[in-house]
Image: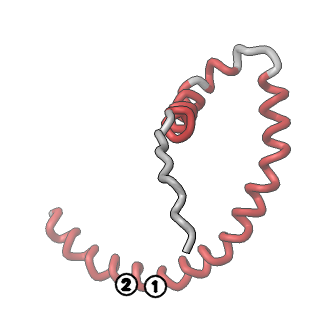
Amino acid sequence: MPPLPAARSFTLSPGRLGGAAIGVSCAVGTVPLLCLIPGVEERLAAQAAIWGPRWSRGFAAVTPHVSRQAERVEPGIKRGVEKVEPPLKRAAL
């Protein structure tokens, strides 16, 4: 049986996980400031042209399942609301 390789140590650098969270929060918080930089509108338009169809395909794959689930759940929720609503109205008066 071959010997086990030596254990390697690793450190969580802020550039990997923490940096991503910081980058997202900074990007969301600085969106209004981005409009002041020249050329940003063209860059955002180019990114939207690239990612828009991918997002549409992703949503199109999920939409039928979600709508079917909503149709299946709706009658039960409607019955529950009809059962609870009259006592709540009486209690409110």
- Residue denoted by label 1: 75
Q: Position of residue 28 (x, y in %)?
A: 57, 32
The residue type indicated by label 2 comes to Arg
Asked whether, in this view, residue 79 is left or right of residue 92, the answer is right
Check the picture and name the quadrant holding the N terminus. Answer: bottom right
Label 1 crowd (10 A; few <14 / some 14-19 / many >=20): few
> The disc labelled 1 sits on which kind of residue?
Pro
Q: Position of residue 6 (x, y in %)?
A: 50, 53
Q: Which residue does the image show at 51% across and 37% down from the upper left?
A: 21
Q: Is residue 39 above or below residue 47?
A: above
Q: Is residue 72 or residue 20 the one in the foreground?
A: 20
Q: Position of residue 47 (x, y in %)?
A: 80, 39
The location of residue 55, given as percent across then percent down, is 73, 55
Q: Are marks 1 and 2 in contact (CB under 8 Å)?
A: yes
Residue pointed to by mark 2: 79
* SS class, disc 2: helix
